[in-house]
Amino acid sequence: MIRYALLLTLLAAPLAAQDAPRFQPSGRGTSEIEMMVPEGTTVVPKIRLDWGQPHLRGRSFPAESLVPMDQVWRLGANATTTLTTDLMLMFGQAHLAKGRYALFVLPTAAGWHLIIQKDEGQGVGDYSADKDIVRVPLQHRTMATPVEGLTMWLVPASSGLRGELRIVWGAHELSTAWMAM
């Protein structure tokens, strides 16, 4: 009798697993662009974003469980989101030197803000307002088709050393301009 019950359990386990929802695990996302440089230059400057990519998995965004309003969010999952630049950049009114920066977002009813801090090896939830370099207002647009996983792009402009940072999750797109100096 025990063998029969064990056999039924072993045969039923794969069937139960097939019915379980399949969710993509949180991974890492990157967006990198290479800037145009004068001929004869051997080093190609780059700008790179690196973030943990959470997925909605049936939840809504923003939601108190994912990104609470009026609280700083680490902008991603599992680790601090970073921006690394080989060029001086300007976000909003702030000039950023070459280096690595930690990015956070502050959602409020009045609008969303990108918070940029010097990356000092912050842990997953380590945020301190006294380390803010700049808070840049983000433009908001509602997407017609929701995006399951948090996605970010560094979109270069068609000319010049400038572009846009886009952050998309759910039906929300947030963006701000940047310019190389």
Image (cartoon, rainbow, N blue to C red):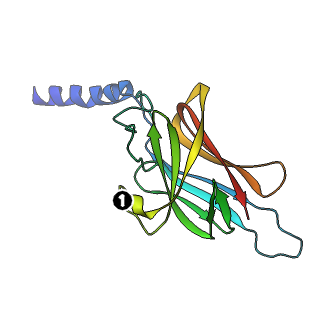
State which quadrant residue 15 falls in.
top left
Above or below 147: residue 164: below
Q: Amino acid at mark 1?
A: Asp
Above or below 89: residue 40: below
Q: On the rendered image, what quadrant is the C terminus found in? A: bottom right
Q: Is residue 156 left or right of residue 17?
A: right
The answer to whether residue 5 is visible is yes
Identify which residue is drawn at 36% across, 59% down: 126
Identify which residue is drawn at 10% across, 29% down: 2
Q: Residues within 10 Å of mark 1 (few under 14, many from 20)?
A: few
Residue that extends furthest to the left in the rendered view of this protein: 1
Residue 170, percent across and down? 52, 31
Residue 101, percent across and down? 53, 63
State which quadrant residue 39 falls in.
bottom right
Q: Is residue 21 left or right of residue 35?
A: left
Q: On the rendered image, what quadrant is the N terminus found in? A: top left
Q: How many marks?
A: 1
- Name the residue that disc number 1 marks: 126
Identify which residue is drawn at 83% across, 67% down: 37
Above or below 97: residue 29: above
The answer to whether residue 54 is visible is no
In depth, the one of 160 and 150 nearer the eye is 160
Residue 69, percent across and down? 39, 37
In depth, the one of 99 and 131 nearer the eye is 131
In depth, the one of 173 and 8 nearer the eye is 173
Above or below 158: residue 127: below
Q: Secondary structure at mark 1?
A: loop
In depth, the one of 27 and 88 nearer the eye is 88
Residue 31, percent across and down? 63, 52
Q: Is residue 130 left or right of residue 96?
A: left
